Image: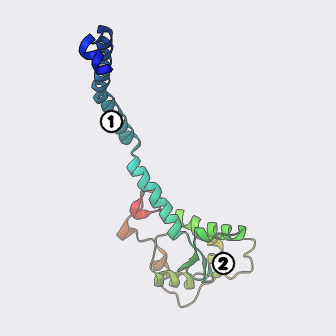
Amino acid sequence: VTSYKIRYEGISPNYVKSYLESEVQQMKACMSLPGVLLLFGSFLLGISWHLRTDIMHGWSDSIIFDIQENANFAFSEAIPFEAARAGHKGVHDVNSFADFWSWMNLGFVPLLWTDSWASGEHRASAIQKCSSHYKLLHDFGWDKILLRSSSNSSSSQCTDFDIMTEPATGFQGNPPTPMYLWFNAL
């Protein structure tokens, strides 16, 4: 019926006019699309240049990785009398209040606030053996009142102890930033 009506009676001018108006409206909408895409692209570039999301993502991933892999506790050595070599538990192994405080004291805090230059296992063991029990316990955070009965003398075999404990500033220089992540200072 429709093709018969179109063939013999023709199309009304109102129908043609409404069809052309809808086509012009669709064409205008498509012509505004490049402007919208340009605005959206400039917004994305402005955000990425201003916030530096790639750098922030790298920083947050490296800090999370460092805490997960290097903030260990549950050492098998008698800390502070022996140098801590390898902690057997990490942040995901914290299951109680005691584990949390052990992780905080032995893993997390020493990772962020290092008070000396890193040294090899042999040198660290020698420094621990040559230090007095008083110094080791005091450096570990014990109060001086509790340490009154502790001996303040070191081993007689340690003649070059002062050479071993001084920082390697001649080779590595003085750090311009805190010592956390010395080679990747934030």
User: Which residue appears at 30% of the width and 11% of the height?
Assistant: 17
Q: Nearer the viewer, residue 34 or 56?
A: 34
Residue reaching furthest to the bottom: 157
Q: Callout 2 environment at 10 Å: few (<14), some (14 to 19), or many (20+)?
A: many
What number of labels is visible? 2
* Tag 2 and tag 1, C-beta contact below 8 Å: no
Horizontally, residue 125 falls left or right of residue 173, namely right
Residue annotated with mark 2:
134
Q: Position of residue 125 (x, y in %)?
A: 52, 84
Q: Nearer the viewer, residue 95 or 133?
A: 95
Question: Marks 2 and 1, Cα distance to the nearest angstrom?
Answer: 64 Å
**In the rendered image, which quarter is residue 33 located in?**
top left
Q: Position of residue 87 (x, y in %)?
A: 56, 77
Residue annotated with mark 1:
41
User: Which residue appears at 45% of the width and 60% of the height?
Assistant: 62
Q: Position of residue 145 (x, y in %)?
A: 75, 71
Horizontally, residue 36 falls left or right of residue 116, namely left
* Helix, strand or loop under label 1: helix
* Helix, strand or loop under label 2: helix
Up the image or down, 173 lies above or below 125; here it is above
Residue 113 in view (yes/no): no
For the C terminus, give its image quadrant.
bottom left
Of marks 2 and 1, which one's residue comes earlier in the chain?
Answer: 1
Q: Nearer the viewer, residue 50 or 162?
A: 50
Q: Amino acid at mark 2?
A: Tyr
User: Which residue appears at 39% of the width and 38% of the height?
Assistant: 47
Q: Position of residue 41 (x, y in %)?
A: 33, 36
